[in-house]
Amino acid sequence: MENRIVVVNDKMQKDYKYVLSEPIGKNFDPEFKPQLSPKQMLKLGVFGGKYLNDCKDEFPKDWYKDAKMSPERKDVSKNHFGVDASQPLSFWINKGWIYPEDPRGWFQWYCRYYMGRRLPKEDKRQIGRWKAMVRHIAQIRKNCKPKDLNCRKRQRQALLHWAYDSRKI
C-alpha cells in the first residue's frame, strides 16, 4: 500500500497532517478487536449524533449515509439506546485523556486508526483505554438477563461508544 497523507481542516484542527500507512479496516494491533466499525457506530447512533459533523471531508462519505446525526447540538434520542452516556469534552480534557493529535478523543482516534493511521505510542494508550471498558461488559452480564436491552441502557450505550456491540450481551 502506498502511504497517503491526509490534511485536516475542521473546527478543531487546522492543517493537521497524518499518514495512512495501513489499508482501511485492516492490520490492527492483535490486542485490539473492536466489534463495530466507525460506520456501524454512526449508523446505530452514538454521541447524541453530534460527533464528527464537521469532519465529513476527512472520512468516507458512506460512513455518513445512514448515520444518525444531529447538526446543531447533541440529541440523545439519536443514540441507539436513547440515553446520554457521554461526558462533555471538558471532562476528558481535565482528566488528561485528550491529546493534540485527536482533540475530540477516543472515537476520533479510532476513526483515524481504522482508516490506517498508526501512532505507536498513542495507539497503545488508546487501546489500553478501550480494553478497560470490559468492566462494563462484566456489570451487564452480572446484573442483566442475556440480551435484555432495557437493562443498563447507559452502560450499553457507553459500550457502543467504544466499539463494543452491547446488543449482543
Image: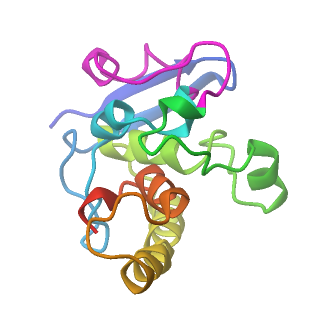
Residues 80 and 88: in front is 80
- At 62% across and 45% down in the image, what residue appears? 84
Residue 96 picture quarter = bottom right
Q: At which x and y percent is residue 83?
A: 57, 45
Left or right: 148 in relation to 22: right
In the displayed structure, would residue 150 be above or below residue 73?
A: below
Q: Residue furthest left?
A: 1
Residue 125 picture quarter = bottom right
Q: Quadrant of the C terminus?
A: bottom left
Residues 3 and 81: in front is 81
Residue range of the region highlighted in magenta in the rendering: 50-75
Q: At which x and y percent is residue 66?
A: 29, 20
Q: Quadrant of the N terminus?
A: top left
Q: At which x and y percent is residue 147?
A: 26, 65
In the displayed structure, would residue 71 be above or below residue 90?
A: above
Q: Main secondary structure of the magenta part?
A: loop
